Amino acid sequence: MKKAFTLVELLIVIAVVGVLMAVLLPNAFKSVEKAKVAKLESDMATLKTAALVYYSDTGRFPPDKAFSNGVGQDPGFVTNVAHDPNWDGPYLDRWQENTPFGGKYTWAYACSPQFAAKYPGAYAGYSWSDDDGKLEVWCGSALWDSPAGSLKLPQSAIEKIDRDVDGEVNGNKGYFQYVKYSSKECWTMMLYKKYY
């Protein structure tokens, strides 16, 4: 005669499996979020290096894509979109369009209108001050909520990135900042900023 499991034994096994899942699943989700944060920070570091080498070759940063309807497009790291004779790229193997959290990467280079002649390629309609003061010019990579609602950046990820970049969770200070434009949201990793 074949020995079968009793109902009590089956219930115990189901309970043990349930407890294990309750303990392990949250950690698995945290690991996924940590991997996304690490990928995002790595992408941003790669863009920073590419931008500095681009600047070293050409004497300026790549032209703006964030404010000029070019969200998600290569600003000149892969191809010479500005037709600059000093361009010695490509500075990236390929443009990383999508962020690990959804949405798009884009390149933002903006200045206040009174400084437009000083910063070729910068979007010259930008007037914004962060908690450090009134910005004359800034550039960096941005994580755009494009299309609206696509960028799903959990608060815990925002705080982790902010802490990693700025050393503290400080919102609208430092180099990792949050900006809201009408219906869209943007998290920006500033590479360079100058005040007036």
Image: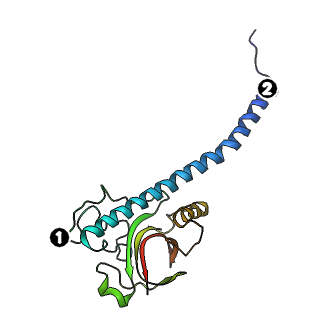
As drawn, which residue projects farthest toward the top? 1
Of badges 2 and 1, the one in the foreground is 1
Quarter of the view holding residue 170: bottom right
Under mark 1, the amino acid is Pro
User: Residue 119: where, in percent of width, then height?
Assistant: 31, 81
Return the disc, 2 or 1, that comes first in the chain's sequence.
Answer: 2
Q: Residue placed farthest to the left in the image?
A: 85
Question: Are discs 2 and 1 less than 8 Å apart at CB?
Answer: no
Question: Label 2's element?
Answer: helix
- Left or right side of 19 for 57: left
Task: Report the disc number at residue 85.
Answer: 1
Q: How many marks?
A: 2
Query: From this viewpoint, which residue is outermost toward the bottom?
Result: 114
The residue that appears at 50% across and 54% down in the rendered structure is: 38
- The colour scheme used here is rainbow
Identify the residue shown where x is 37% and y is 65%. 72
Position of the N terminus, as image quadrant, is: top right
> Disc 2 residue type?
Glu
Q: Give the class, few, some or many, for how many residues have Cα within 10 Å of label 2's Cα (few <14, many ≥20).
A: few
- What's the CA distance linking mark 2 and mark 1? 76 Å
Q: Which of 1 and 147 lies nearest the eye of the viewer?
A: 147
- Using the image, tell me which numbered label, if any, was put on residue 9: 2
